[in-house]
Amino acid sequence: MALFRDIEAAAAGGVDPRSDEARALLGRQNELFGQFTGGNPAMSEGLKKMWEDQANWPEQMKKQVYEPFAKAGNPHAKGPAPSFLSEKGRSFMDAVAAAK
């Protein structure tokens, strides 16, 4: 939750995607992803494909993934198209990744 809040604050605050602050957020995101996959390339690739296919997830799967974050206060994790970040937050992180 702290990472998502920090990304949203950076996006809302107009942090430059090429800045050290933005790169640190990307580093934290990548570290979290690495911890989840254990650095296994096949697991990383499968997880990326799974996230890209969210539109086809069963409702129960969306609930299992997002409900804990919604209950913890993430407003973007609610509704018919839940997410961890707002559109602005996602766009910001895409720009950070592109600026590498």
Image (tube, helix red, strand yellow):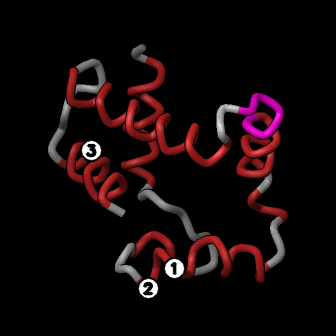
- Of all residues, the one furthest to the front in this rendering is 38
Which span of residues is magenta-colored?
40-44
Q: Quadrant of residue 54?
A: bottom right
Q: CA distance from mark 1 to mark 3?
A: 23 Å
- Do the residues bearing badges 1 and 2 touch, measured as CB atoms within 8 Å? yes
Indicate the secondary structure of the residue bearing disc 1.
Answer: helix
Q: Quadrant of residue 19?
A: top left
Closest to the observer: 33 or 77? 33
Residue under label 3, please give it: 11
Residue under label 2, please give it: 71
Q: Quadrant of residue 55?
A: bottom right
> Percent position (x, y) of residue 6?
26, 51
Residue at horizontal 64%, vertical 71%?
A: 65
Q: Residues within 10 Å of mark 3 (few under 14, many from 20)?
A: many
Q: Residues within 10 Å of mark 2 (few under 14, many from 20)?
A: few
Residue under label 1, please give it: 68
